[in-house]
Amino acid sequence: MQQFFATCPKGLEYLLRDELIALGASEVREALSGVHFSGELVDAYRACLWSRLASRILMPLSEFAAADEHALYDGVQAIDWSVHLGEEGTLAVDAVSNASLMRHTRYLAQKVKDAVVDQFRDRNGNRPGVDLEQPSIRLNLLLRKDRALLSLDLSGTPLHRRGYRVGQGEAPLKENLACAMLLRAGWPEIFKGGGALVDPMCGSGTLVIEAALMAADVAPGIRRSYFGFLGWLGHDGDAWEALRAEAESRAETGLRALPAAFFGMDEDPNVLNQAKRNAQQAGVIGFTRFERQSIEHLQRPTDAAAGLLICNPPYGERIGQQEALAPTYRAIGDKARAEFDGWRLAVITSDEDLGRAIGLRAHKRYALYNGALECRFLLFEIGGDAAPRVVEERPMTPGAEAVANRLRKTIKHLRKRLDREEVHCWRAYDADIPEYSAAIDVYNGREESRPDRPPASWLHVQEYAAPKEIPEHVASARLAELVRGAAAAFELPRDHIAVKTRYKAKGGGKYGRMDQRSSFLIVEESGLKFRVNLFDYLDTGLFLDHRPVRARLREAARGTRFLNLFCYTATASVYAAAGGARTTTSVDLSANYLEWAARNLALNGFSGAAHQLIQADCLQWLQHDRGEYDLIFVDPPTFSNSKRAEDFDVQKEHVRLLGLCAERLAFGGTIVFSNNYRRFRLDPLIAEQFAVRDASNASIPFDFTRNSRIHQCYELQPR
């Protein structure tokens, strides 16, 4: 089995994952702007030919440290290029640098090229040439944190270039984005139900043409004359020709049965002519109809009772354009209501106000990117029981608007880093406005009970105790304003927001009774998957502030015997196992959390005798256990008064607890000790017994820096 990586525009990762699974790929998992998968070479060929969403298909050749140009050159030279390229061949190199010392991508590409051609020249005096358009092989260098990943680009040129476009308008959609819109809108199901497709602002016809090709089961790459593997010495010509022959047969069958159900309209006669030429080149001109028409004169096609009305209207990115475009968006909504009862409407726009100008309530929203521009893809059901309606919402209070504006600024400020570091669960708000005292965490994931649905965003809101002088009704009203502001900022329905409220009770503020939904999300962190429950428990199953701590444990775990005390849902054990720990042992008093822990381990492929789960009081268990461990993670609660164990106070008990851990620690081992008691002080006795490194500052995630005392973390080694 070979590893591959399919790149795609941001926002298409989960769609691409599902597509690759349907194409027969194995071990498929999404990442930022792409999807990892495994398979044979023929599976990569199939992805090149059939993927409607991928941009490139990369086959990794080597990964190595490359802190400077010499290390990069040597790493590339370590590959035997004679098995990939002949001396009479040509090559090209693309380079990307992320969080590395070397950032000049053109220089990096040049260095990789030099290393390849120098190897040939040193052997026999001849060297390959360079061809930037259609080289024999194209190499892709990703330099991230001074580690180089060098891959062979099997696609050669971006896969969205289908080979049929001979003309385009001013702002054409890329073909893979058009396909993502069609898939999100449910076009395959609508077509199977006998529906038609109408694009009232079709431009050069991309949506219409891609919809027809999708409906006819035509492989998107069938008209491409060039792929990056065709000049590669490892190319399997027989396998490729067999795939092409199958695709040709399927296209012939699909086109033979395709109805003429694809309609494109536009006011510009020039782009309409381009659309017709593109449809001709794509082989679907006989099934499409392009007409010059304004949105104001749009009518439903005769004999088309149901279907999809979809368009990519102008966005108004320039100052002053929004007001001029609002009537166009209103016309889209008006015509949809008047002419397309029973249809579905799908519109992409980067401007939320223009989206609202449509005057209909969207039943679904998706984030998609048109190039670097973040857009909203809006879906509306027109007429029938699910009739969209214009909603005059009660205006937000100034407080709710202030919360929404604060969150929007935070989202804008953190988005690039969240994307770059592939952080899907993070803290968005922590009493940033003192009057609205709560923490808001974002969780992006799939509902465990509905794996067929795309991932979505959810919010977890925990109210902080209000000062005694604040009346309860005022605190309650402020919490309601905060929740409404958060829903507006993240564009989420209320049922995607879990709220943990406090009430007054003897001994101080207490959280009220949790919901009983038994509803779990599957979220991802650093390529690992975890179950979280936002509604039924005070904590969700994943401590977001421990993200760097878990990463540190993963780095330190290779080859170790790992012990996780007070393990909760064993997220740290999953990280240790992923980091190469020989064994993991996870101890907790709660059977419920241990069952949860077992599912987290299994979700990531870790099970069996190497990964033990033990239900016990940790202090008592340490006194009787005779095991030896190289790495121990201890994250006790601040207080505990369980009926099944001795009362526990971390400030009073940490000396005894860490002493017992030291007895179980192998020579040269490390204890990582963490707790979230804000007034905690490490006893001086600990410094006498251990070499102590205070790792607290380094263990606070960037999204938690507004409250750096959220936990403390120490690394301890016996003296």
Image: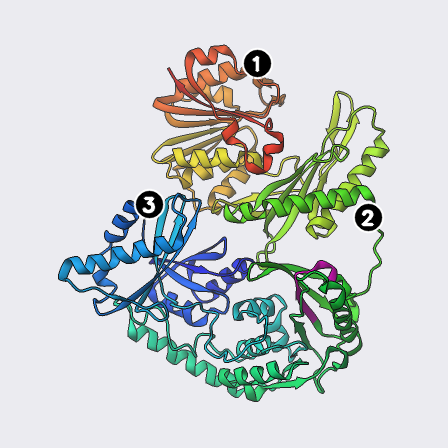
Q: Is residue 63 above or below residue 117?
A: above
Which-is-in-front pick, marks 2 and 1?
2
Disc 1 secondary structure class: helix
Q: Amino acid at mark 2?
A: Met
Mark pair 3, 1: CA separation: 48 Å
Disc 2 secondary structure class: loop
Image coords of residue 256 (percent x, y):
51, 88
Name the quarter where the N terminus is drawn: bottom left
Among the two numbered marks 3 and 1 on one chain, the one whose residue lies closer to the N terminus: 3
The residue under the point 69% across, 65% down is 379
Give residue 474's quadrant in the image.
top right
Image coords of residue 707 (percent x, y):
62, 30
Residue 543 visible in rendering: no
Mark pair 2, 3: CA separation: 53 Å
The residue under the point 21% across, 64% down is 127
Q: Which mark is residue 66?
A: 3
Crowding at mark 1 (Cα within 10 Å: few <14, some 14-19, many 20+) = few
Residue 446 visible in rendering: yes
Mark pair 2, 1: CA separation: 48 Å
In this picture, residue 419 sits left or right of residue 436: left
Circle 1 is placed at which residue position? 652
Highlighted range, magenta: 345-354
Which-is-in-front pick, marks 2 and 3?
3
Circle 2 is placed at which residue position? 396
